Amino acid sequence: MGRVIWINGCFSAGKTTVATLLVERLGQAFLLDPESIGATLRTHLVPPELYPGDFQELDLWRSFTRDAVLDAAKRFDGFVVVPMTIARGDYFDQVIGAVGREVQLDHFTLMASRETILGRESTRPDDTGDWAQKTVDRVLPALEDARFAEHINAETQTAEQAAQEILLRITA
């Protein structure tokens, strides 16, 4: 059975970059990105008039994500690294909490200031529709809650340093 490393944090906090570095350094590791589940739901499985604007509001996204992570962890003898923001407590319980009740789970939250998050979003090459700007004032305070610990400083640390800190914490 595998082990899940969930990398949480605001949009543009560096989750995917840190997750990619972890996959490279861990060896037997797989990156599972729930964004692709959301994109598939948005473009192929949910009628546009029923799409809520944020795929996390879909029960289907939460169940698909939970089941995909659990399936990978139960069938893959290695690390399943998941970079995904989940800041609502009830969604955390339904997805991350449920995963942690069935397989070994390490959950980390990358924390950075509002200014840093928005600055990083402005330099992203992809078109995100200002998602960080739309969500940071709701997500950042929510992630300060103890439920979302262990916190990793993504304000002053590079992605490489954050990945190294996570590696140290999971092997300690």
Image (cartoon, rainbow, N blue to C red):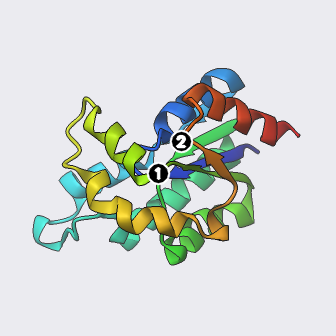
Left or right: 93, with 132 as reference point: right
Q: Secondary structure at mark 1?
A: loop
Near-viewer residue (47 or 153): 153
Please state the horizontal and vertical placement of residue 113, each as a whole percent of the image: 47, 51
Identify which residue is drawn at 55% across, 65% down: 95
Q: Quadrant of the N terminus?
A: top right
Q: Is residue 148 above or below residue 113?
A: below
Q: Position of residue 149 (x, y in %)?
A: 67, 60
- Cα distance, mark 2 to mark 1? 7 Å
Image check: 57 left or right of 84?
left
Residue at image point 67% right, 47% down: 4
**Looking at the rendering, which quadrant does residue 134 occupy?**
bottom left
Is residue 87 visible in this depiction of the protein?
no
The residue wearing badge 1 is 113
Q: Nearer the viewer, residue 36 or 129?
A: 129
Residue at the spot of label 2:
155
Q: Residues within 10 Å of mark 2 (few under 14, many from 20)?
A: some
Q: Earlier in the sequence, mark 2 or mark 1?
A: 1
46 lies above or below 43: below
Three-letter code for the amino acid on which mark 2 is drawn: Glu
Specify the amino acid type for callout 1: Ser
Judge by depth and name the residue closer to the eye, 63 or 111.
111
* Residue 40 on image: x %, y %: 28, 50
> Crowding near pointer 1: few (<14 within 10 Å), some, many (20+)?
some
Secondary structure, mark 2, is loop
